[in-house]
Amino acid sequence: VYLAKELGIPFATTAIVTDYDCWREDEKVSVDLVAQRMRESSDRVKTLFVTAIKKIGAMDWGNEIMEAKKTARAGVMIDEHVVFDHLKY
């Protein structure tokens, strides 16, 4: 995550809850249970991604891209006069 930010790559994370065994001692977890929960969640995750991609595609990311390029450029420790075309802003 931090490496992506240093490289100027915008990102988002997604997590799928598959079990609660870290705090529910009476619920045993198994590979089968995790796989079942992943299958049960797959349609919701697909819907989430399709919806998010449509919304992301409709937004103006100009400012975020410029800030990401500034962050990436600041993270490169070389002569300040060296120019990377993909990091121009």
Image (tube, rainbow, N blue to C red):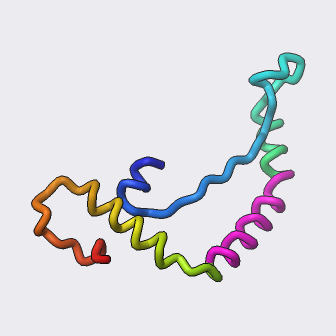
Q: Quadrant of residue 8?
A: bottom left
Query: Residue placed farthest to the top in the image?
Result: 25
Percent position of residue 50, x then y: 73, 72
Give the answer, above or below, for where 45 lies relative to 18: below
Give the answer, above or below, for where 86 lies relative to 6: below
Percent position of residue 62, x then y: 48, 78
Choose between 48 and 34: the one closer to the eye.
Answer: 48
Q: Residue at x 44, y 72 (%)?
A: 65
Percent position of residue 41, x then y: 82, 53
Q: Quadrant of the C terminus?
A: bottom left
Give the answer, above or below, for where 74 lies relative to 21: below
Q: Quadrant of residue 12?
A: bottom right
Please identify the dominant SS of the magenta region.
helix
Choose between 23 and 55: the one closer to the eye.
Answer: 55
Q: How many marks?
A: 0
Q: Quadrant of residue 29?
A: top right
Percent position of residue 36, x then y: 84, 44
> Magenta stretch?
40-56
Give the left or right position of residue 75, taking residue 6 as reference: left
Give the left or right position of residue 81, taking residue 69 as reference: left
Is residue 48 inside the magenta stretch?
A: yes
Q: Residue at x 84, y 17 (%)?
A: 25
Query: Residue placed farthest to the right in the image?
Result: 26
Q: Residue at x 79, y 22 (%)?
A: 23
